[in-house]
Image (tube, coloured by chain):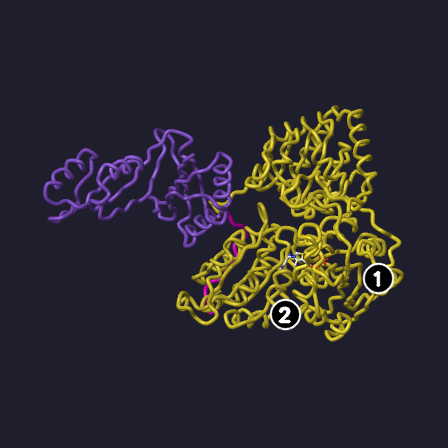
Chain colours: A purple, B yellow
C-alpha cells in the first residue's frame, strides 16, 4: 500500500543523506521525497511517499524515529489528509494543436507560464494521480519535458505536526 | 578561557572521566596528539592498526561500565577503523570515536588522506558529527558521550578537521545536555508490564530468552531474581551469556544455530516466551516462519522500538530499559499471591529434563587428539569460571560459548552481530586495561588470530598479560564445517597452508609461546600459562582437525531441525 510519511527533521547537514541512506540500506521504496525548511529555520519538513506492507511501514516509521536528527514522524495516510504535487510540463504547441492544448490545460486548472511559437510550459498542481491523468491525456510525442516535485502532504482539520 | 580545539577535546575527555584513549597518530590528528602529550590524565594506548584501536575500546566498554574511546587519523586511519566501528554497532556497544579530518577548506578537494568519514561510517554508527566550527566542539563531544551511552547504546563518531583542532574558542563543558529530537522511551508502560506479568503467571510451559540488552543495561541481577522467583527455564543468547548464571540449574544453555537441544526445543514448544533485550536474530530463531508457526504468546522487553516485531510479531511489547522493567515485574509478582501453576511447571521441567538427557554437548573424551571442547572445559575449571574470555569468530567461538560457563555479566566478550575475525586479541587488550588484575583469556583460531596478530606488539608495550588459547585446527574450521555438511567436502580455500610457527612468533614479539600437542599436556600448559601473571602467554594448541560444532541448525532451517553429533 502507498503511504505518505511526514517527517520533521533537524535542519542539519547530513540529515537528508541519513534518511535516504536508511531507505536504501534497508531496501525500502522511495516513490518521492520532498524537503524544505519550515517557518522555524532550524527544522525541515520532509514528505516521503513510500509503499509496503503494514509491517514494513511500521518498521520504516520506527527506523526513522530512531535517527537522532528526526524529531517526529507521522503517517498521513492513517487519517484524512491533503496531498499536492507541482508539475511543470513543456509541450509542443503549434498549429491547430495549440488551441487544444490551451483548452486541456484549462480543464486541468493548469497555468501557462511560458510561451514560444512552438511550445507551452504549463504549471499544474494536484494529487499525483491528477498529474498522471493530464500526462495520459496528451499524446506522448507532444511532451517535450516534465519535472515534478513529488508529493507534499498535510493533515486535514485539526491534525497538526509540530513539536 | 580560550583554548585550542585540541585542548578543548582533551579537557572534554577529562571531564568525561576518560581513562584511556586507544589510537594511532597521523597528520590530521597531530594537534590532538600534541595536547595528549602535554598532560597525563588521559592515557593513550598506541595500537598497531586502527582496527585494533576500535576493538580495544570496544572490549574496554564491554567488560566494564565505562566507555571506550578511540582516536584515529583521517583517510586510511578511518577506513581501517570501520570494521571495528561496525562491530561495535552491531552489538550496540557504547563508544566514542574521534577522527581527524583534513582542514575544512580542503574538504571536498580530494585532499591528501581525505575521505568522507561521516558518509563512510554513517550506516555503522548510532550517530556521527563533523565539527566545522571550534565553538561547537565541546557541546558536540558532550552529545557524543550522551548519545553513545543512553537509550540503545552504540558508537558515536566525531570528525574534527585539522584547522578546528587548531583554532581557539572559549571552553566550558556543558553539565547536561538534551536534544529535542532524541528522547528514547526508557520507562516501560505500566499497563503492558501488568499484562506481561499476568501472562507469565498463567504460563504452563514458559521460557525466558535473554540477550545482550541485559548485559548492556546491567540487568543481570534483576533477570536472575525474576527467573528464580518464577522457577522458569532460561536461555541466554551469545550476546547475553552471563545475564543469568551459567551454572544455575534453571539455565538451559545457548539457543539458536549452535544452541543446546533443550533450549531450542523449549524456545519452540513453550506457551509463553519472555524475550528480554534480545532481537530474534536469524542465528537464534532459525527460519522465522517455522519459529512463528508454534502457538505461543511472546512478551518482548527492549529499549529499541524498532527491535520489536521486526522479525517476529510479538503479543506484549514493552519498550524501556530492561532492568527497570524487570524490577517492576519482580515487584508486582512479589506483592501478588499468584504463582505459576506448580503442576504444569513440574511437567514442563520433566519434558525439558528429557531433552537434556540427549546430552547434546557430549564429545569423545578418550580421543588421542586434543578435543577443543576439552581445552575450554579445562580452562573453565582452572579459572573457576571467573576469567574474562574474549573470542574471535569460528568454531572456537561457539565452543567457548558452549563449554565455558559464565556466571557473571561482562565476562564473555565476542563479536556476535558482525562476526568479526580479528576481534579477540585487540578486544582483550581493552578488557585487560579495564580489569588490570583479572585473568583475561583470548580464545581464538589460527585463522582469526592472524587478522590482528600485530597487536602482540601493543601487548608487549603495555605489559598486558593476556593468555591466548589458539585452538589450532589448521583449518578455517567453521568454513570447513559448512563445506563438509553442505558442499560435499569440497574444502575450497579453507585450509590455512603455510602457517607460522606461533611459538616463535610469540617469542619474536617478546612473549612466551607454548605448543601443546597431547591431551595429557593441556591442563599443565594452561596452569603454567595462568601462573604467569605478568607475561602474555601464547598457547598454540594443536586440536582435532575434524571436530565439528554440534548441535547445528542449518541456515534457513527451523529451530528444532537440529543436526546432533550422533546423526553423522
Ligand atoms: C573478517 C572475517 N572474514 C571472514 C569471516 C568468515 N569466517 C567465519 S568463521 C571463519 C573461519 C575461522 O577460522 P579460525 O579462526 O581458524 O577458527 P575455527 O573456526 O577454526 O575455530 C571465517 C573465514 C569472518 N567471520 N570474518
Q: Residue furthest bottom?
A: B508
Position of residue B12 in the picture relative to residue B247 (left or right): left
B195 over B94 or under it: above or below:
above
Residue B298 drawn in magenta: no
What's drawn in magenta, residue-wise? B166-178
Task: Same chain for labels 1 and 2? Say yes or no.
Answer: yes
Q: Residue B555: x, y in percent?
A: 65, 46
Tell me the element at label 2: loop
Q: Nearer the viewer, residue B428 or B22?
A: B428
Q: Which mark is residue B48?
A: 2
Q: Name the foreground residue: B330 vs B423.
A: B423
B188 or B472: nearer the viewer: B472
Residue B94 at least partly seen:
yes
Q: Earlier in the sequence, mark 1 or mark 2?
A: 2
Q: Residue at x 64, y 67 (%)?
A: B45
> Does A33 sit left or right of B497 as displayed?
left
Q: What residue is pinned by disc 1? A: B526
Q: Quadrant of ligand 1?
A: bottom right
Residue B16's disc is none
Classify mark 1: helix, strand or loop.
helix
Q: What secondary structure prevails in the magenta region?
A: loop
Amino acid at each position: 500500500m502507498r503511504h505518505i510519511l511526514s517527517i520533521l527533521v533537524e535542519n542539519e547537514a547530513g540529515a537528508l543523506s541519513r534518511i535516504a541512506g536508511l531507505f536504501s540500506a534497508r531496501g525500502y521504496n522511495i516513490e518521492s521525497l520532498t524537503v524544505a525548511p519550515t517557518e522555524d529555520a532550524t527544522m525541515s519538513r520532509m514528505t516521503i511517499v513510500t509503499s509496503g506492507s503494514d509491517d514494513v511501514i511500521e518498521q520504516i516509521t520506527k527506523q526513522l524515529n530512531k535517527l537522532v536528527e528526526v524529531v517526529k514522524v507521522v503517517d498521513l495516510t492513517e487519517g484524512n489528509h491533503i496531498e499536492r504535487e507541482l508539475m511543470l510540463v513543456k509541450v509542443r504547441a503549434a498549429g491547430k494543436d495549440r488551441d487544444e492544448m490551451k483548452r486541456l490545460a484549462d480543464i486541468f486548472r493548469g497555468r501557462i507560464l511560458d510561451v514560444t511559437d512552438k511550445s507551452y510550459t504549463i504549471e499544474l498542481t494536484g494529487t499525483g494521480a491528477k498529474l498522471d491523468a493530464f500526462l495520459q491525456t496528451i499524446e506522448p510525442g507532444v511532451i517535450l519535458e516534465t519535472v515534478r516535485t513529488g508529493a507534499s502532504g498535510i493533515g486535514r482539520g485539526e491534525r497538526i505536526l509540530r513539536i | 578561557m580560550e583554548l585550542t580545539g585540541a585542548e578543548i577535546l582533551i579537557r572534554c575527555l577529562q571531564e568525561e572521566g576518560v581513562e584511556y584513549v586507544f589510537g594511532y597518530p597521523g597528520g590530521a590528528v597531530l594537534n590532538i596528539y600534541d595536547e595528549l602529550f602535554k598532560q597525563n590524565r588521559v592515557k593513550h594506548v598506541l595500537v598497531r592498526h586502527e582496527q585494533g584501536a576500535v576493538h580495544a575500546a570496544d572490549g574496554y566498554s564491554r567488560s566494564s561500565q565505562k566507555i571506550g574511546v578511540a582516536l584515529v587519523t583521517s583517510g586510511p586511519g578511518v577506513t581501517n577503523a570501520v570494521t571495528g566501528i561496525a562491530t561495535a554497532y552491531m552489538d550496540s556497544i557504547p563508544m566514542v570515536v574521534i577522527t581527524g579530518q583534513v582542514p575544512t577548506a580542503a574538504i571536498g578537494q580530494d585532499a591528501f588522506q581525505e575521505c568522507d568519514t561521516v558518509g563512510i561510517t554513517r550506516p555503522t554508527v548510532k550517530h556521527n558529527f563533523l565539527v566545522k566550527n571550534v565553538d561547537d566542539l565541546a557541546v558536540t563531544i558532550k552529545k557524543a558521550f550522551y548519545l553513545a551511552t543512553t537509550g540503545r547504546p552504540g558508537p558515536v563518531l566525531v570528525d574534527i578537521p585539522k584547522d578546528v583542532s587548531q583554532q581557539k574558542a572559549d571552553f566550558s563543558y556543558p553539565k547536561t545536555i538534551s536534544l529535542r529530537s532524541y528522547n528514547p522511551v526508557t520507562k516501560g508502560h505500566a499497563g503492558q508490564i501488568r499484562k506481561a506479568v499476568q501472562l507469565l503467571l498463567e504460563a504452563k510451559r514458559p521460557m525466558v530468552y535473554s540477550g545482550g540488552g541485559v548485559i548492556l543495561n546491567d540487568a543481570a541481577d534483576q533477570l536472575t531474581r525474576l527467573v528464580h522467583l518464577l522457577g522458569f527455564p532460561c536461555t541466554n543468547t551469545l550476546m547475553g551469556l552471563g545475564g543469568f548464571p551459567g551454572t544455575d540449574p534453571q539455565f538451559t544453555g545457548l539457543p539458536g544455530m549452535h544452541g543446546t537441544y533443550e533450549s531450542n526445543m523449549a524456545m519452540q514448544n513453550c506457551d509463553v516466551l519472555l524475550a528480554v533485550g534480545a532481537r530474534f536474530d536469524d542465528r537464534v530463531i532459525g527460519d522465522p516462519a517455522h519459529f512463528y508457526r508454534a502457538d505461543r504468546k511472546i512478551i518482548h522487553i527492549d529499549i529499541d522500538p524498532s527491535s520489536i516485531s521486526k522479525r517476529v510479531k510479538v503479543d506484549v511489547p514493552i519498550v524501556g530499559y530492561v532492568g527497570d522493567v524487570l524490577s517492576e515485574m519482580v515487584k508486582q509478582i512479589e506483592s501478588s499471591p499468584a504463582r505459576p501453576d506448580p503442576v504444569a511447571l513440574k511437567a514442563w521441567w520433566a519434558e525439558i529434563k528429557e531433552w537434556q538427557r540427549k546430552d547434546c554437548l557430549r564429545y569423545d573424551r578418550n580421543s588421542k587428539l586434543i578435543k577443543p571442547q576439552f581445552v575450554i572445559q579445562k580452562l573453565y575449571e582452572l579459572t573457576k569460571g571467573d576469567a574474562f574470555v574474549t573470542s574471535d569468530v569460528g568454531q572456537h567461538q561457539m565452543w567457548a560459548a558452549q563449554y565455558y560457563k559464565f556466571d557473571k555479566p561482562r565476562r564473555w566478550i565476542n563479536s556476535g552481530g558482525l562476526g568479526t575475525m580479528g576481534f579477540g586479541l585487540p578486544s582483550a587488550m581493552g578488557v585487560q586495561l579495564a580489569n588490570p588484575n583479572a585473568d583475561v583469556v583470548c580464545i581464538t583460531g589460527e585463522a582469526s588470530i592472524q587478522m590482528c596478530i600485530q597487536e602482540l606488539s601493543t601487548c608487549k608495550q603495555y605489559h598486558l598479560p593476556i593468555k591466548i588459547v589458539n585452538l589450532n585446527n589448521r583449518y578455517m574450521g567453521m568454513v570447513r564445517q559448512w563445506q563438509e555438511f553442505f558442499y560435499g567436502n569440497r574444502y575450497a580455500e579453507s585450509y590455512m597452508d603455510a602457517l607460522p610457527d606461533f611459538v616463535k612468533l610469540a617469542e619474536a614479539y617478546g612473549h612466551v609461546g607454548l605448543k601443546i600437542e597431547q591431551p595429557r599436556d593441556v591442563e599443565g600448559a594452561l596452569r603454567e600459562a595462568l601462573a604467569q601473571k605478568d607475561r602474555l602467554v601464547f598457547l598454540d594448541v594443536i586440536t582435532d582437525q575434524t571436530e565439528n560444532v554440534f548441535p547445528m541448525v542449518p541456515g534457513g532451517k527451523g529451530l528444532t531441525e537440529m543436526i546432533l553429533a550422533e546423526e553423522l
